[in-house]
Amino acid sequence: MARDYVNLRQIVKYIHENDIENHPSPEDRLKKLYDTDNEHLLEVLNAVNFCVDLLKEDGEYRIPREDGELIEWILQDYTSPEMKHIRKGEFGQVDIEYTYRLLDGLDKMLRHLGVDAETIMAQQQVMNTKTGFHISVRMWNIQYELMRMLHDMTAYMKMPTFNLTYNNRVDYLDQAMDITEEYVKEVREAFTKIWKERKAYVEAHSIPITLEEMEFSRRSIEIINVLHENEEYMTIRRQLSEMKTDKGFLKKYVKERRKKEKRLVEIFREESSKFPIDVQSMTKIEKIMCLAEGSFSIHYEGGAQQAYVTFDVDTSNWDDYML
């Protein structure tokens, strides 16, 4: 059966039908509303790392009619508290069912569009990573089971229908405490096991580096000193730090951050060009920084003499380490 499609213009016209019809210039009003709603839609989709090009054909939105309701909901809920959290990237403050509605709706729309399975899987992964959805679901499930257990325990202690004696209840709570202590121990051991596995993997697949090899050369120190004396450079660094503390809506934040980061790189190149490069005097960490094609991190445990440079980097919270 052939699928029916709508475009964003039709959805916008449906949402604002009365506003448009009662306006002296309906077409002008529709165009203005379309531009605004299109901007709002892009902001929400970009916030969850959804590739909007998947919804377009020859530059025009092509949305299955059955998914028009999802787009309508996104646009009409744009200013709601939950959607504001999404637009700010504050996914941990969004109700799990709300996030699920958005991500599941986008996933279904791709399936209705006939997008290939590999692309859908990749899109799911980037959205889930950006929003931390799988982590939030598991944390919610754990909290729910713990709260339900405490609720049941309270009921056991207070409901007369169980006909428990005082000593019965004390005995039950003592046993519950023993089980709780064992549970807490197992939960902590599970984390330790995962952490040790990760540590072993890093040490086996990373570049070992000593603390001395992580030091910067005289040239780098001189560049750092010059940058610290550069008023514009330090002002931008301070502004980036303030933006990170209260970054507001993601769209505006990312745009401003990229602009400022670009200027930082320009200043760095201008200042560093004044100091000739001597490869022989470069330290190991500086050579790695020059040769690395992508992101890397340094795995180091306090008190150890050995660190590891790993290129297996989780960038889901990369903005936390921007500065």
Image (cartoon, rainbow, N blue to C red):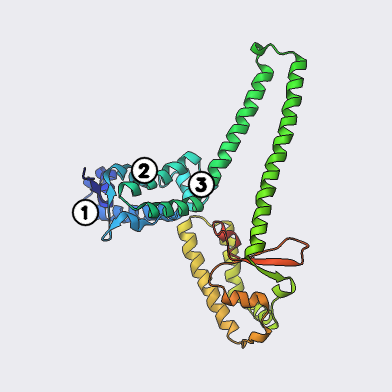
Disc 2 is placed on an element classified as helix
Which mark's residue is nearer the viewer, 2 or 3? 3
Q: Is residue 268 above or below residue 127?
A: below
Is 208 displayed left or right of 37 in the figure? right
From the top left corner, tell me how far across and down residue 91 is, in percent.
52, 48
Dot 3 crowding, Cα within 10 Å, few <14, some 14–19, many 20+: some
From the top left corner, tell me how far across and down residue 216 is, in percent.
69, 77
From the top left corner, tell me how far across and down residue 188 is, in percent.
70, 43
- Residue that badge 1 annotates: 27
User: If you read the primary sequence from the N terminus, does the residue marked by circle 1 or circle 2 appear first?
Assistant: 1
Dot 1 crowding, Cα within 10 Å, few <14, some 14–19, many 20+: few
User: If you read the primary sequence from the N terminus, does the residue marked by circle 3 or circle 1 appear first?
Assistant: 1
- Residue that badge 2 annotates: 73
Disc 1 is placed on an element classified as helix
- Residue that badge 3 annotates: 133
Instruction: Please state which amino acid type lies under the numbered disc 1.
Output: Glu
Which mark's residue is nearer the viewer, 1 or 2? 2
